[in-house]
Image: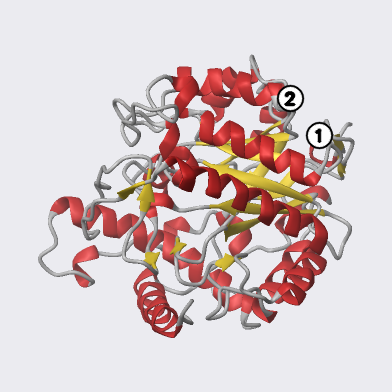
Amino acid sequence: MTDLLSQPLKLPCGATLSNRLAKAPLTEGLADEHNRANEKLVRLYERWSEGGAGLLVSGNVHIDRRYLERPGNVAIDNNGGLEWIRAYAKAGTREGNHFWMQINHPGRQGAVTRDGTFPAPSAISLNVPGRPEFVPRVMPEEEILEVIRRFAFVATTARESGFTGVQVHSAHGYLLSSFLSGLSNTRTDAWGGSLRNRARALLETVRAVRKAVGPDFPVSVKLNSSDFQKGGFTNEECLEVVRWLGEEKIDLLEITGGNYEQLPWLEDVKPSTQRREGYFLDYAKQIGTVATMPLMITGGMRTRAGMEEALRSGGMDVIGLGRPMCVDTDLCKRLLARETDEAVSYESALPVDPREIAAGATDAEAKALEMWTNLVWFFVQIWRIGEGQGPKADMTALEAYRIYRDTEDRQTAALAPL
């Protein structure tokens, strides 16, 4: 019997993934006060490399230290520490698997700003309950072009440091994704208006990255199948962008969806919700009808049967695993060896009354906080692995939230000046 998960995949650039399982990109929050890689990330990725996936994708590596998704992000911005970037790459490839650097700019969804602003295509505030409201700063064209140059610079650094590929992050409402959406991009110049104009920032970034790394180095993109917001980036628009990305000869397209304002993948973490596999599988099947590049689906894949069905009939080529890998770091190895047929979700152990954390929260704020505490539980597991402690599956969501809050407060206070 053919084991679909064990089949190698040759990419358009000529590189080959050894199997169809990937550790999906997960924000780590382990960088030092200069936003450099360190021994914690080396330790984490050594463990994930030993875990059997044919592909690992890093969490956010930012192109500009002024704007971070969280204080512990790695950034490559003339901040030194290249020896640790090389060690990071070596750790993530130690078992012969691919390790790709995810390159990003948070845009208006940043949590840390060094200049008091967050750049965005338009001055439209982020509508997230419980988050301080601010009006982002409109980016002039020269700043957009500088962002594109920075993506190419970081991609070059990734290749020179030993990473085996890169992923351009254009999903979940971060900067390139926000250019795609008609809700967050209301520009009337060449970077807004028509879909072609709104896609220009992404497409020109991909072109610049490809030129920087050459034709034989994997270049991938993470793209929303939809923003799931009225007036936002739609599935129909996604299909058109996928056609354009095909013209750019990218090597892998990771399909996801949503943003900070609409988090569809978090709805399924609540115990009361009926779970299903492959949050974006139906969308990905549609995308597969126009895609000329291999596709990766991330979100909700939990059983061997579901993964194999996605590979067999869903037009998918790679299965991305995220939250389960924060605890079961050797999950892929056990799936490939047929020692297990299921990924443990862990979400069922996570319910917390959000009013234990924020008394007097509105219903909307309570819902947002409940989703957030479910996420930070996994963040804390990643930290524990990086610190050499190992995951703690019996940790409560409330305990994790308190650890997360205290740790990020310390990280923010310790950030080195630019």
Distance from Cα at disc 1 to Cα at disc 2: 8 Å
Residue positioned 67% across, 20% down in the render: 291
On the image, the x and y values in percent for residue 171 come to: 50, 41
Residue 248 visible in image: yes
- Residue tagged 1: 4
Left or right of 344 on screen, residue 319: right
Q: Going 45% across and 56% down the picture, which residue do you hit?
A: 347
The residue at the point 43 percent across, 59 percent down is: 375
Q: Residue at x 34, y 31 (%)?
A: 187
Q: Nearer the viewer, residue 206 or 347?
A: 206
Q: Position of residue 215 (x, y in %)?
A: 84, 37
The three-letter code of the residue at mark 2 reads Arg
Asked which colour scheme the image uses, the reply is secondary structure
x, y (%) of residue 146? 54, 49
User: For residue 47, what is the image quadrant?
Assistant: bottom right
Q: Which numbered marker is on residue 280? A: none
